[in-house]
Image (cartoon, rainbow, N blue to C red):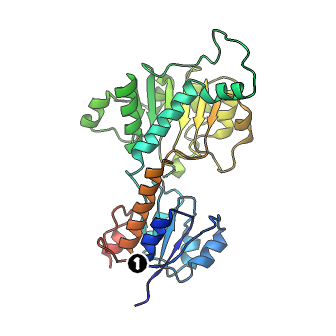
Amino acid sequence: MNKQRVLVARKVFDDVVDHLRKHFDVEANERDEVWSQDELIRRLQGKAGMFIAGGEKIDAALLDACPDLRAVCSMAVGYNNIDVPACTARGVLVSNAPDVLTETTADFGFALMMATARRITEAEHFLRRGEWQRWSVDMFAGADVHGATLGILGMGRIGRAIAQRGALGFGMRVIYHNRSRLAPELEAPLGARWVSQEELLREADHLVIVVPYTPDAHHLIGEAELAQMKRSATLTNVARGGVVDDAALARALRERRIAAAGLDVFEGEPQVHPDLLTVPNVVLTPHIASASIPTRRAMANLAVDNLIAALGVGPQAGRPPTALNPEVLARG
Ligand code: GLV
């Protein structure tokens, strides 16, 4: 029997692709090109499955142009790039990669928040420019992290893992805002208190944003919300570009209406709002919160396990471990 054909949209670890080759006829992207939508559609002809990294746009137009497609498996946890209802309507299984990146992403979110509070990259740039001539009492003096109030917007798995680091490792007071309140047994070990979004913005010394991107979350933090924060506060975004209004944030940073920001995600990335590149009090990283080698491997392996199972082969045939619309398979 001919093997089913699948497309791997970005370059991933060789052994991960080799694993896929055991089950499928694989077209890989050895040169790691970022294919246009037309190119993606062209390459998807005759393909039953697709492994994506997270940036690819899977919408109704692409699905309609690729009638053989039955599974889209992403190695990212966020899936705002995929129109899941459109996939479901066409019988296309979708999976993401939750859990395997939670701790790594929380490590990074915490590190970015600390680098922001303690002005680490700003100080490093000063040193590299050769400007360090003498000591002074307030040189790069920032805000304390230990004992401060950690405000978390979006208390899902990653939000809770960041809260755990703050509460248990740094003696921080944890407040959070989320659509739904955590069960008391999850709140208690963190000493976490649910507050309104207004109270979160008003009270947080360090605000960390971990809310998934949806149209409702677009510019959730804009001019008005930034105005509610303390002038001494920091803001860290490891969620998605577009949750924060980057232009408004750059203005608030320049005018020192908040102390500093740490950003791993941007509206329209890999483009970065030019004003963010010129304000000193922001730490900028290129969407790398989940980028440890073991975690990136685990994410890729999970996407592959989903793809193999979704296309009805391997030990978990018909039972992809982290499907977002498993009802598609139940329909048969
Ligand atoms: C990264 O941003 C992810 O969603 O996994």
Q: Looking at the image, can residue 229 be seen?
A: no
| Quarter of the rendering occupied by the C terminus | bottom left
Q: Is residue 129 left or right of residue 232?
A: right
Q: Position of residue 46 (x, y in %)?
A: 53, 83
Between 246 and 301, the one lying in front of the other is 301
Residue shown at 27% from the left, 38% from the top: 183
- Count neighbours of disc 1 (C-alpha within 10 A) and say few if under 14, some if 14 to 19, many if 20 or more: some
Q: Residue furthest top?
A: 137
Q: Is residue 201 above or below residue 290?
A: above
Q: Position of residue 83 (x, y in %)?
A: 51, 64
Residue shown at 27% from the left, 30% from the top: 189
Q: Is residue 216 above or below residue 67?
A: above
| Quarter of the rendering occupied by the N terminus | bottom left
Instruction: Please tell me in which quadrant of the rendered image residue 192 appears.
Output: top left
Residue shown at 46% from the left, 28% from the top: 200
Dot 1 beta carbon under 8 Å from ligand 1: no
Q: Is residue 258 left or right of residue 53?
A: right
Query: In the structure shown, which secondary structural element does the residue marked by tag 1 occupy?
Result: loop
Q: Is residue 100 above or below residue 52?
A: above
| Disc 1: which residue | 23
Instruction: Please tell me in which quadrant of the rendered image residue 38 appears.
Output: bottom right
Q: Position of residue 283 (x, y in %)?
A: 62, 34
Q: Position of residue 53 (x, y in %)?
A: 53, 60
Total label count?
Answer: 1
Q: Residue furthest bottom?
A: 1
Tag 1: residue type? His
Q: Looking at the image, can residue 220 be seen?
A: yes
